[in-house]
Image (cartoon, grey):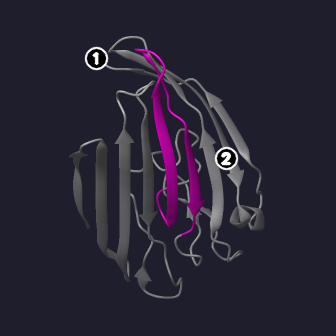
Amino acid sequence: HTIGSRIWGTAASWDYNYEILFQTGSFGADNIIALAVATETGYSRPKWRFNPRFALRSDTSSGDRDRNSHTLGTFNPLFPTTAYSGRIGLIGASNIIDVTPTARFRLSRRIYFLPEASFFWRESIADGIYSVLDTLQRTGKLSTARYVGAQVSAPVQFSIDRHFTYTALVTRFFTGQYLKQTPPGRSVTLASIPAAIRP
């Protein structure tokens, strides 16, 4: 069972969106107690050149503390997406802490530059890291390092009209100590041009 709450709104030049989720239940003979918190706080200056918005996003999802206990602490995102790690999709939403400064610049009426940088840590060093499909990707047994890595993205979004949008994107993921101690620990680059069509 997942129980959650969300508050959001605006105040002068600020906007905010905060969520908290609590999970409980059972899996076989084990009990589930897990938690996740997601926040984003933004600051916009529409009268400045390029109409910038600056924001800080931070997400935390719990990991398991003791693999020998009968209490499961790994948060299950239930309907996973790449929201935590962008289109490169390397990091899932279980046992992870991420801090992501972002910005938005309106270069023209239909073109936006949306840079961001994300930093990832394991919430529990007893647990591993998970894919966006919530499958265990790296074990937590081989390293006590908490820092997973950093990711820098530089998307440019083009809105052709209200139905069709595409984005030119380059993302680079830099491996941290944890990934280097649980090889392979190579950094990864993604270049893509995804498109979206809306009715």
Query: Of helix, strand and loop, which one carries label 1?
Result: loop
**In which quarter of the view is residue 34 placed?**
bottom left
- Percent across and percent down for residue 181 are 76, 68
Tell me the chief SS of the magenta region: strand
Closer to the camera: disc 1 or disc 2?
Answer: 2
Instruction: Give the quarter of the figure containing the N terminus.
Output: bottom left
Task: Please say if 62 is above or below 162.
Answer: below
Label 2: which residue? 173
Q: Is residue 191 left or right of residue 31?
A: right
Report the residue that reaches farthest toward the front. 48
Specify start and end residues of the magenta stretch as a single range.
93-122
- Percent across and percent down for residue 103 are 48, 38
Instruction: Give the quarter of the figure containing the C terminus.
Output: top left
Could you tell me how far apart the alpha carbons at marks 1 and 2 are, in whole angstroms? Answer: 34 Å
Label 1: which residue? 199
Examine the structure image and report whether residue 106 is included in the region drawn in magenta. yes
Task: Please say if 180 is above or below 145.
Answer: above
Report the residue that reaches farthest toward the top. 160
Give amino acid for label 1: Pro
- Percent across and percent down for residue 67 are 53, 82
- The residue at the point 51 percent across, 56 percent down is 99
**In which quarter of the view is residue 116 placed?**
top right
Report the residue that reaches farthest toward the bottom. 69
Query: Of helix, strand and loop, which one carries label 2?
Result: strand
Give amino acid for label 2: Phe
